[in-house]
Image: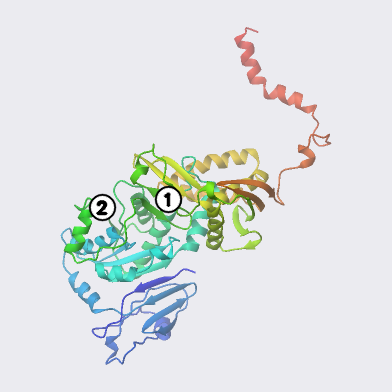
Amino acid sequence: MAQLKAISSCSPTSLAFQVPKRESLLFNDKVSCPRKLSSASELVARTSELHGHAVATINGGNITKFRKNQVIQAVLQSDREMEISEATKGIGLRGKLNKVVLAYSGGLDTSVIVPWLRENYGCDVVCFTADVGQGVGELEGLEAKAKASGASQLVVKDLKEEFVQDFIFPCLRAGAIYERKYLLGTSMARPVIAKAMVDIAKEVGADAVAHGCTGKGNDQVRFELTFFALNPKLNVVAPWREWDITGREDAIEYAKKHNVPVPVTKKSIYSRDRNLWHLSHEGDILEDPANEPKKDMYMLTVDPEEAPDKPEYIEIGIESGLPVSVNGKVLSPASLLTELNEIGGKHGIGRIDMVENRLVGMKSRGVYETPGGTILFEAVQGLESLTIDRESMQLKDSLALKYAELVYAGRWFDPLRESMDAFMEKITETTTGSVTLKLYKGSVSVVSRKSPYSLYRQDISSFESSQIYDQADAAGFIRLYGLPMRVRSMLKQGM
């Protein structure tokens, strides 16, 4: 279920109520506050326009709207927010924007970006956080952090099911792997987040979006190409390409100057990105490709040397190239991946150490943990060996390389990728069945595969005599198949 929370706090003064001009909303909306109001003008709630019928309930002064599969929680505005609104009426140092939706994590960088946007663009800042499976700990305390930084609103949206169903599974079906190893964990997450930002910008009436990506990485491209594809009218602000802040110490000083609380969490020596598909590690000793990763760096997978001494067998059910069940239990896409992450992690499955070519031209070294994803790739490709013929598989594999390149480069909404996805969907229509895999100390291998659409025929493949395949026919086939090579040799020898 997609979940959205537009967060602010209840204030005893200066409240105003704003509702989209829709008769059905006015009829269904119910609003209350935990104290007696002197007038209707005291009440404030920000609502977002979603598809479906609205039903509102009251919980401690909060207005909760249920619309089909989405939930919005609008909490009453505070005096602090009124002050922010007043402070953003002027033109900033670099120009004027009305409202900016910021991709927000709550860390030092994005906390500093909030006042920087207000100072430089005189704008209202709406912080947006996407839940793509980075863990509950990453989402705790975001409301307080956003408000302390000067944001007028925090929106948190649960994108886990959409992420797996609409982004991860198509890549899995396509067999998309970048540069022989990388299973595209970060690459797939950015367009789903950016797409949600475009939707939020429309709902809150923002004229710009912003992100905290650096000018050296791939993510800036992935975010901005999605913005261009879905709403080219939006202004895009990338502070790391504009401001004078050059590192953590500068950011801390800027935060202190603008009364922004500096996050007190201990900074990791690694740069990490985590979602439901993978966990990446970069920086520190990894910047030297000659250094072996430290054992205590890994977080999702146990050391294969310390994994169970007994192998575990699991069965993955697949329909039309997409996984649907684990050991006979049908699960939603996100739940299925979560379970496989746990199973694969305890066996040390899915560790990758590689040097890759970034889109911007430089090489970078990264270490990835993708336990559930590694299992799924082995399962799908194992079943394809039964259901896809040679010529189709060769073409599919060649297109998978281009597919991975497009996803890595942030071109998810490119018509070329969408067209290739149509081919992948068609070619895997019969990739249905089950695969049994053996997990043991960091390795995963297919030990059994079954499909009602299998092209494998034991009566043909057997070394025993067969009425369908006459071995004597092979002689003529070889002579014709090898004719070009034979003619070339004859020419060289003057025959």
Give the image quarter of residue 238. Answer: bottom left
* CA separation in Å, label 1 and label 2: 31 Å
Given this view, does label 1 or label 2 mark the residue nearer the observer? 1
* SS type, badge 2: helix
Residue occupying the point 38% across, 53% down? 272
* Left or right of residue 489, residue 345 in this image: left
Return the x and y of residue 394 as percentages of the image width and height.
Answer: 59, 38
Name the residue carrying label 2: 240
Return the x and y of residue 278 as percentages of the image width and height.
Answer: 46, 53
Return the x and y of residue 351 as percentages of the image width and height.
Answer: 49, 47
Return the x and y of residue 193 as percentages of the image width and height.
Answer: 40, 59
Name the residue carrying label 1: 296
Asked if 52 appears above or below 125 in the picture, the reply is below
150 or 247: nearer the viewer: 247
- Regarding residue 422, the answer to whether it shows in the image is no
Report the amino acid beneath label 2.
Trp
298 or 216: nearer the viewer: 298
Give the image quarter of residue 196. Answer: bottom left
